[in-house]
Structures are given as structure tokens and as C-alpha cells.
Amino acid sequence: MPYMKYMSNVREIVKRILSWGSPEKYVRKLHESKKYLEAYSEHTDSRITTEPHNAIGGSWEEMGKLQFDFLVKRGLRPHHTLLDVGCGTLRGGRHFIKYLNAGNYTGFDISPKAIEYGRKLVEEERLTDKIPVLFVSEEKNLKFEELRGKTFDFLLAQSVLTHLPPESIEELFENIGKVMKEKSSFYFTYFDGERYKHFSIEDFRYPFSHLESLAKEHGFSVKDYSNEYPHPIGQKMIEVVRHGAGL
């Protein structure tokens, strides 16, 4: 992005936040005036404009490597295809793009600024020959219609379900099978809790039993791999496979 355009965007975001009061008030105003995922997308865009490495959770180096090492340990190889659900600014994506064969990485996000930054990062790190597919989910849903029937060996949603309301998680389980092969593995993180809790504007807790029940309802089995995934703020890691695929 040209410097002058970048600074103009920064000034516009700062002006908007100041006009609405504190950053928290700014986020609350967004969510009062827009649908949840639209507000979340706009909030993410504002953070990426000013701090792209911290906008999607921070711990840029630590979390990027953690995701990569975990999936390789779970069997990801260069010839496999990977769908990075909510890929953000490629905190983990850049590691996967380097490792996978050309054309085998696909990432999407509801934040246009995240994808814009990700494409720039691919160029800066000289990864264009890996031909990663990066796109914005214009409909801001989890129906995977933009992928037009394409399926993947591995699927990852790092710090995605942690920010999704119940209706979006149900939509995810209803549709994730469309982009999975018979032996695919879908890994996701979430905040665990004894009961459902919307504990901040954009953060949610779910009991494992609820996620397990949703998975079974749509023909999947789940397994907890949290003991192999030392997340710095305690997110749990779950594997989802088609029922019977792991037997």
C-alpha cells in the first residue's frame, strides 16, 4: 500500500475511534449498528491498518510456528492441500505456504485488510511462486460457496471459533463437510468452559460437549489434542474427522 494512502487510512480510523470515545466504545458502537460478522470484519480492518501483527491475536512468531509444527506433527506433508479458515494476516499461513507444494495453500478471511496484507506479505517473502490462493469471504459466512466444490486434506481454524456466536458455529458444522475429503482432518481451537458464555464483545466460551454434539449431528467424530498444543492463553485444539474415518 502506498505510504500516503496508508497514513490516510490510519488517520480515518483514529478519527472514527476518537469520535466514538474509547476503543472499547468504538467496538461496541460497531456491534450495535451492524451484524456481528460485519462489525467484526470492520473492527479487524481497523486494527490491521495500525498493527497487522497484533490485530489477529499477537504472538506473531510463537503462534505461527505453533500452528505449523502441530500440523506437521499430525501428518501434514508438502503434497497435501490445506484450507486456512480465517487465515488473517498469515501468521501461520506464511509457514504453510513455504512448506507446501505450489498451489496447495488456500486461505480466506472476512477482513479485506487481512487479505490485502497477506498478499503483500507473500510478495515480500518471495512466495509468489508457491501460488497461494487468498480471498475475502464477501458473504461473511461459513458456507464455503466461494470454493466451488474444492476439497482439502487438512483444514485449520486457529482463533476462529473463539470469536464466533452459536449460529455461526452451527453453520460451520453444517457446511464443513463440503470441503473435506473422506479422510480429511479439520483442526480448530476454541475457549473451553463448563457452559456457553459470551464473555467479551468478540469472545465466546463453549463446553466441549456442545461441540462434540454438533459434530456428531453432522456425521463427524472429534478428538481433543490440547495436550499437544500449548497455546499461550489456553485455547483448546480439537480434531474433526468424518465418523469412522479415524478407525
Image (cartoon, rainbow, N blue to C red):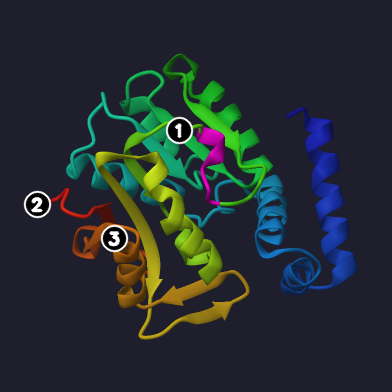
* Mark 2 in CB contact with mark 1 (< 8 angstroms): no
Question: Residue extending furthest bottom?
Answer: 194
Which of the 4 image quadrants contains residue 224?
bottom left
Question: Residue extending furthest top?
Answer: 129
Q: Which residue: 32% across, 71% down?
A: 213
Q: Which residues are magenta?
A: 142-147
In what quadrant of the picture does the N terminus appear?
top right
Q: Position of residue 76 (x, y in %)?
A: 23, 36
Q: Position of residue 223 (x, y in %)?
A: 21, 62
Residue 244 in view in this figure: yes
Q: Amino acid at mark 2?
A: Leu
* Residue under label 2: 247
Q: Residues within 10 Å of mark 2 (few under 14, many from 20)?
A: few
* Residue under label 3: 238
Front residue of this view, candidates 178 and 184: 178
* Side (left or right) of 4 relative to 50: right
Name above or below for residue 92 compared with residue 39.
above
Mark 3 or mark 2: whose residue is earlier in sequence: 3
- Real-space Cα distance between discs 2 and 1? 26 Å
Nearer mark to the viewer, of 1 and 3: 1
